Amino acid sequence: MSEETLQNTSEQSVSSVEGLTFREAMTELNGIVEALESNTLELEDSLVKYERGIALLRFLKESLTSAQQKVDVLMGELDMSVDDSVTDSTLSKA
């Protein structure tokens, strides 16, 4: 596999991650790990798989971070609704 082919494959693997669901990305990453651990791939194929795995891992980490932020916001809204009533009652006394 030429260096140009590796570069094109790498760019394609990174860009095609965006359309995956979290579960699809996890399944694909698990398959890549199994393939790399099998020691049956040629070096070039291993590099392509490794790069795809890194792209998937980044996508998964970003997805988890985003989900955590959403949970934090929702939890903050729950806390704020309790705090707002306390704040409102304090303000009305002033």
Image (spheres, grey):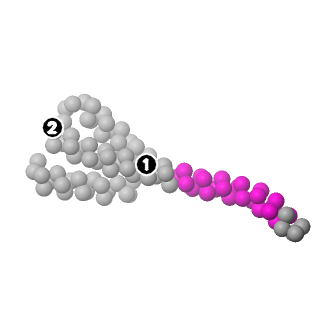
Relative to 92, residue 18 above or below:
above
Relative to 67, residue 37 above or below:
above
In the image, is residue 70 part of the stretch drawn in magenta? yes
Can you give x and y, in whole percent of width and height, for residue 85 in the image?
A: 81, 61
* Viewer-side residue, 71 vs 13: 71
Q: Which residue is mark 2?
A: 42
Say left or right for 10 vs 89: left
**On-image quarter of the C terminus:** bottom right
Q: Which residue is mark 1?
A: 61
Identify the amino acid type marked 1.
Answer: Lys
Say left or right for 24 vs 83: left
Residue at 11%, 48% in the rendered image: 1
- The extreme front residue here reads 94
What residue span does the magenta drawing correspond to?
67-89
Helix, strand or loop at mark 1: helix
Helix, strand or loop at mark 2: loop
Task: Give the quarter of the image for residue 28.
Answer: top left
Q: Residues within 10 Å of mark 2 (few under 14, many from 20)?
A: few
